[in-house]
Image (cartoon, rainbow, N blue to C red):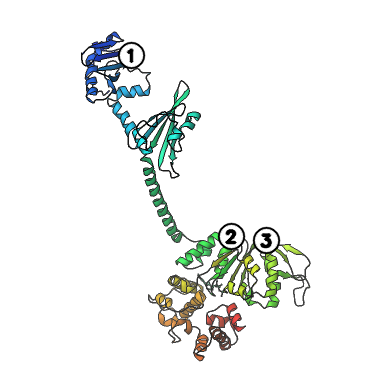
């Protein structure tokens, strides 16, 4: 055991059983008195040097330990006028923690003093009535109090939002609570009830001034790490294999990543989705992905292109017809797309082209999911999810009175916008590689080398037909590359500088023939010319123009 005193010789030992003794000295007259154990006088030689040291520090009172056999002694000392008074007692095994602390730590009072005066801790003590009986200087300064000013006052009058009185009543400690004087938690507070004889006699409050800064530092560090993890997760999201349906949608440009994220989010939900975007951007692939990632994926997606059908057929395709309801129909009647899509998704492509009378019927079906076949007198409830797509600007159609606003709201529970190729030219290298690989796989070709200048060259071209047109141009170039390395010249075989025109000669001719046509006129003329050039084969004409068949039908009128 460490003390500031040498060991007392055994003959001067104070036994464990000896009781408290009082020693008194008149500093001026040197007069001494001792009361208590007769053997107390025997430790005088050990106690006095410790007392002198304490006196030299000029303190009015003190606590110190003195080593003795068989037990150490605790000395409490006071200066009263010119006299010094000491209470001396041995430390026993049953002594409380404080006494043992005092007896075993030679600088025990300095430790206690540190706690009371620490700039990082504020201490206050209330009695059982919740009145302040001690408040440390640090706490006084923080609260703007003069020394001793708050003593005897209720804690909740002096300390904003104090809970000392509550802890006196409950007797339950509150450890490490955030404390706020004015709504912003800047301190950590512990309130500890002190029990004596089975009752709460007071509460010690301890406010940590340094703690919150540490907590805030940790919080900042955790936030930094969290955002780092999120960044890695985002990166991994790109690296990790995508679901197949999303992988079919080639492209990792920022707009495509955003779109894929939205698809994942929306797919799960049973809301109608309207997919918007120019012709050939991949709206159908988006619709398929929405279905494949939805809870309805076990069933087949049911699709219908509304622009590719004459109005007379559209109604029966959508809603079906009852047996014998019209001449030329199947005898046993026919199920419509909505019924076919029971527990699945129905995808209505080119929904902006739907005739007005069918818009009304469609609205009715969307409102209550009741489908009535043509010529039938009963309707049937069908559990379908609707996904629709259009290249039209729907607000313009609605403003022109060509599309019902109420139907638009029904369709567009959520709208997804598919970016045009010009908005994501950085996807061209990936699209080029994918389309080349797919073409070669289909035709059992070896994948040719792709010239380095190819992707930048393609990115410089205009792609009014978007990805569909790009794909068609790549496949055409592959055909004429005859298995050699794919180069720019394979895209320029028509001699035109711009592949967008070169692959659509009819369109180029139409543009050159008339110096002032509107774009719509140019497109219309090009469509007619292409159909004529290709012997009336609309499928081939659409391919040659780099547009969808439905788009071609629209142009032909
Ligand atoms: N991101 C893409 N990744 C791979 N292929 C794509 C992508 N976008 C479009 N395509 C391809 O382009 C062609 C047209 O796609 P799709 O039919 O989905 O376009 P769309 O927007 O529905 O066109 P439209 O409005 O003319 O019907 C398809 O061959 C499709 O595979």
Q: Is residue 278 above or below residue 155?
A: below
Q: For this view, does 152 lie left or right of residue 339?
A: left
Q: Secondary structure at mark 1?
A: loop
- How many residues crowd around disc 3 within 10 Å: few (fewer than 14), some, or many (20 or more)? some
Question: Disc 1 versus disc 2: distance between alpha carbons?
Answer: 84 Å
Contact between labelled residues 1 and 3, with CB atoms less than 8 Å apart: no
**Residue highlighted by disc 1:** 20
Which numbered mark, 1 or 2, is in the foreground of this view?
Answer: 1
Q: Residue at x 57, y 67 (%)?
A: 287
| Numbered tag placed on residue 294 in the rendering | 2
Residues 27 and 307: in front is 27
- How many residues crowd around disc 1 within 10 Å: few (fewer than 14), some, or many (20 or more)? some
Question: Disc 3 versus disc 1: distance between alpha carbons?
Answer: 92 Å
Instruction: Say whether disc 3 or disc 1 marks the residue closer to the N-terminus.
Output: 1
Instruction: Say whether disc 2 or disc 3 marks the residue closer to the N-terminus.
Output: 2
Q: Residue at x 55, y 68 (%)?
A: 285
Question: Disc 2 versus disc 3: distance between alpha carbons?
Answer: 14 Å
On the image, the x and y values in percent for residue 72 come to 29, 18
Q: Can residue 336 be seen here?
A: no
Q: How many marks?
A: 3
Dividing the image into 4 quarters, which one contains the C terminus? bottom right
Instruction: Say whether disc 1 or disc 2 marks the residue closer to the N-terminus.
Output: 1
Q: Residue at x 69, y 73 (%)?
A: 358
Residues 336 and 223: in front is 223
- How many residues crowd around disc 2 within 10 Å: few (fewer than 14), some, or many (20 or more)? many
**Residue highlighted by disc 3:** 383
Contact between labelled residues 3 and 2, with CB atoms less than 8 Å apart: no
Contact between labelled residues 2 and 1, with CB atoms less than 8 Å apart: no
| Numbered tag placed on residue 328 in the rendering | none
């Amino acid at each position: 055991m460490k003390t500031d005193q040498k060991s007392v010789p055994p003959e001067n030992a104070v036994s464990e059983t000896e009781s408290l003794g009082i020693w008194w000295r008149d500093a001026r007259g040197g007069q001494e008195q001792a009361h208590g154990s007769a053997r107390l006088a025997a430790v005088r030689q050990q106690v006095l040097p410790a007392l002198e040291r304490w006196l030299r520090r000029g303190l009015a009172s003190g606590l110190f330990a003195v080593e003795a056999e068989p037990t150490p002694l605790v000395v409490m000392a006071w200066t009263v006028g010119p006299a010094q008074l000491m209470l001396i007692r041995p430390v026993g095994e049953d002594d409380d923690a404080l006494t043992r602390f005092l007896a075993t730590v030679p600088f025990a009072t300095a430790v206690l003093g540190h706690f009371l005066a620490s700039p990082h801790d504020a201490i206050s003590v209330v009695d059982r009535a919740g009145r302040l009986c001690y408040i440390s200087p640090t706490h006084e300064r923080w609260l703007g109090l003069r020394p001793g000013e708050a003593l005897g006052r209720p804690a909740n009058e002096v300390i904003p939002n104090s809970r000392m009185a509550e802890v006196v009543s409950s007797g339950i400690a509150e450890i490490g609570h955030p404390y706020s004087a004015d709504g912003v938690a800047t301190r950590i507070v512990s309130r500890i009830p002190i029990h004596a004889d089975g009752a709460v006699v007071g509460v010690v409050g301890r406010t940590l001034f340094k703690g919150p800064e540490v907590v805030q530092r940790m919080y900042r560090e955790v936030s930094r790490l969290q955002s780092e993890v999120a960044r890695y997760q985002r990166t991994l999201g790109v690296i990790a294999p995508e679901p197949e349906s999303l992988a079919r949608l080639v492209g990792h440009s920022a707009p495509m990543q955003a779109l894929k994220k939205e698809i994942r989010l929306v797919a799960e939900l049973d809301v109608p989705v309207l997919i918007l975007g120019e012709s050939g951007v991949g709206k159908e692939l988006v619709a398929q992905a929405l279905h494949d990632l939805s809870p309805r994926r076990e069933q087949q997606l049911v699709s219908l292109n509304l622009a590719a059908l004459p109005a007379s057929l559209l109604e029966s395709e959508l809603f079906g017809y009852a047996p014998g309801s019209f001449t030329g129909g199947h005898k046993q009647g026919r199920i419509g797309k909505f019924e076919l899509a029971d527990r699945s998704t129905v995808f209505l492509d080119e929904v902006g082209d739907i005739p007005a009378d069918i818009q009304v019927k469609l609205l009715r079906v969307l409102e209550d999911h009741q489908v009535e076949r043509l010529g039938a007198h009963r309707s049937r409830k069908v559990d379908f999810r609707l996904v629709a797509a259009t290249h039209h600007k729907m607000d313009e159609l609605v403003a022109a009175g060509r599309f019902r606003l109420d139907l638009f709201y029904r369709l567009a529970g959520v709208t997804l916008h598919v970016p045009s190729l010009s908005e994501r030219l950085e996807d061209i290298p990936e699209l080029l590689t994918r389309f080349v690989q797919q073409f070669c796989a289909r035709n059992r070709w070896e994948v040719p080398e792709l010239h380095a200048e190819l992707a930048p060259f393609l990115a410089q071209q205009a792609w009014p037909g978007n990805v569909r047109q790009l794909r068609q141009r790549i496949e055409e170039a592959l055909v004429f590359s005859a298995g050699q390395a794919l180069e720019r010249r394979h895209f320029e075989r028509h001699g035109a500088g711009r592949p967008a025109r070169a692959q659509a000669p009819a369109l180029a001719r139409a543009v050159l023939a008339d110096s002032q046509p509107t774009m719509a006129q140019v497109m219309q003329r090009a469509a007619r010319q292409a159909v004529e050039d290709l012997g009336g084969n609309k499928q081939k004409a659409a391919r040659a123009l780099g547009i969808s068949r439905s788009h071609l039908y629209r142009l032909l009128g």
